[in-house]
């Protein structure tokens, strides 16, 4: 079961999993996009509509898929979004919505599948963090904290389920070419664009391949680029250095752009 499976990394992973012979189910808000996505995945792909931030709708959607497709062996939480902007200009409601969708969306889905996984003594749960879940990035004050929170969530769930045969993983995508990434680029502050402008985004397909490999290897941390991997594994040492580099990039770009 993949939340946020109608586009981006979620859809790319659904296609990769289907090629491996998996029975795939997708969850997203829009039925029309889900129908199109399911047709791309092919095979026995099923879908259910739900806003993952809804604590009632999400478990119900998962229950429907389990009833039709069988027990959930792998849950991939990909649902999420980002609206970059200056901290003091973003509406408070935007911070609340980011936390409801990005963080609580994973909580609701995970709570719906882990009891059965524990009882069967098998299963995989994957949450999608980000490079911005390792170090805060200018302009992502609403988004980045949700990705830090997902790291903590995965750490705790792993400690509570590892003895029950459940594998938990954290995925750390760098900038990835997806529809969501394209939407972000339309509203990024100039400074944020300067930071990401020198970074070549990877494809969703590359990230999907790394996710599949990570599942097969029972990896706890899944990366697609060496920089994020190094930072996540040694953030206490490298974080200050990277922050200074980001500060220098911003200094070269000048003061906050007028609006």
Image (cartoon, rainbow, N blue to C red):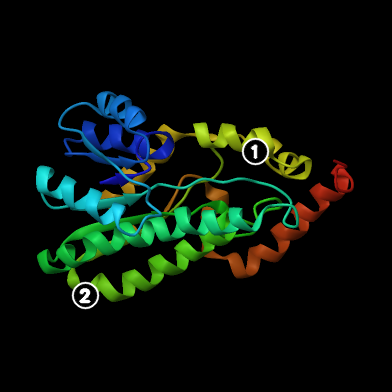
In this rendering, is residue 106 above or below 31?
below
Q: Nearer the viewer, residue 99 or 158?
A: 99
Quarter of the image for the C terminus: give it: top right
- Residue 62 position, x and y percent, is 22, 51
Q: In screen coordinates, is 110 left or right of 102?
A: left
Q: In screen coordinates, is 129 left or right of 216?
A: right
Whole-angstrom CA distance, mark 1 to mark 2, is 40 Å
Please, what secondary structure does the residue beneath circle 2 have? helix
Report crowding for label 2: few under 14, some 14 to 19, many 20 or more residues within 10 A (C-alpha).
few
- Residue 230 position, x and y percent, is 55, 57
**Which is more N-terminal, label 2 or label 1?**
2
- Residue 220 position, x and y percent, is 36, 61
Residue drawn at 39 percent across, 65 percent down: 154
Report crowding for label 1: few under 14, some 14 to 19, many 20 or more residues within 10 A (C-alpha).
few
- Evaluate if marks 1 and 2 touch, with contact meaning CB atoms under 8 Å apart: no
Please, what secondary structure does the residue beneath circle 1 have? loop
Q: Which residue is mark 1?
A: 199
Q: Which residue is mark 2?
A: 163
Residue drawn at 51 percent across, 45 percent down: 81
Residue drawn at 25 percent across, 71 percent down: 162
Q: In screen coordinates, is 140 left or right of 102?
A: right
Place residue 88 in its image quadrant.
Answer: bottom right
Residue drawn at 21 percent across, 39 percent down: 24
Q: In screen coordinates, is 142 left or right of 86?
A: left
Residue 115 is labelled as: none
Whether residue 188 is visible here, answered yes or no, is yes
- Residue 160 position, x and y percent, is 29, 75
Whether residue 178 is visible here, answered yes or no, is no
């Amino acid at each position: 079961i993949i939340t946020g499976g109608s586009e981006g990394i979620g859809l790319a992973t659904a296609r990769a999993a289907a090629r491996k012979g998996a029975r795939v189910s997708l969850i997203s808000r829009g039925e029309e996009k889900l129908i199109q996505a399911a047709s791309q995945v092919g095979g026995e792909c099923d879908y259910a509509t739900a806003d993952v931030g809804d604590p009632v709708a999400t478990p119900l959607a998962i229950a429907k898929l389990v009833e039709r497709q069988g027990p959930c062996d792998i849950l991939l939480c990909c649902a999420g979004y980002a609206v970059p902007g200056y901290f003091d200009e973003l509406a408070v409601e935007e911070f609340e919505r980011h936390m409801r969708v990005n963080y609580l969306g994973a909580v609701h889905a995970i709570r719906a599948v882990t009891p059965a996984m524990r009882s069967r003594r098998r299963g995989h749960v994957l949450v999608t963090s980000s490079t911005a879940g390792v170090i805060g990035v200018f302009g992502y004050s609403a988004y980045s904290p949700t990705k830090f929170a997902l790291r903590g969530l995965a750490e705790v769930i792993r400690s509570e389920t590892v003895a029950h045969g459940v594998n938990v993983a954290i995925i750390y995508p760098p900038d990835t070419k997806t529809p969501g990434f394209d939407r972000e680029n339309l509203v990024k502050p100039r400074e944020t664009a300067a930071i990401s402008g020198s970074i070549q985004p990877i494809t969703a397909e590359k990230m999907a391949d790394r996710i599949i490999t990570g599942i097969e290897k029972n990896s706890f941390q899944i990366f697609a680029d060496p920089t994020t991997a190094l930072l996540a594994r040694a953030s206490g040492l490298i974080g200050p250095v990277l922050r200074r580099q980001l500060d220098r990039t911003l200094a070269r770009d000048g003061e906050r752009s007028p609006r």
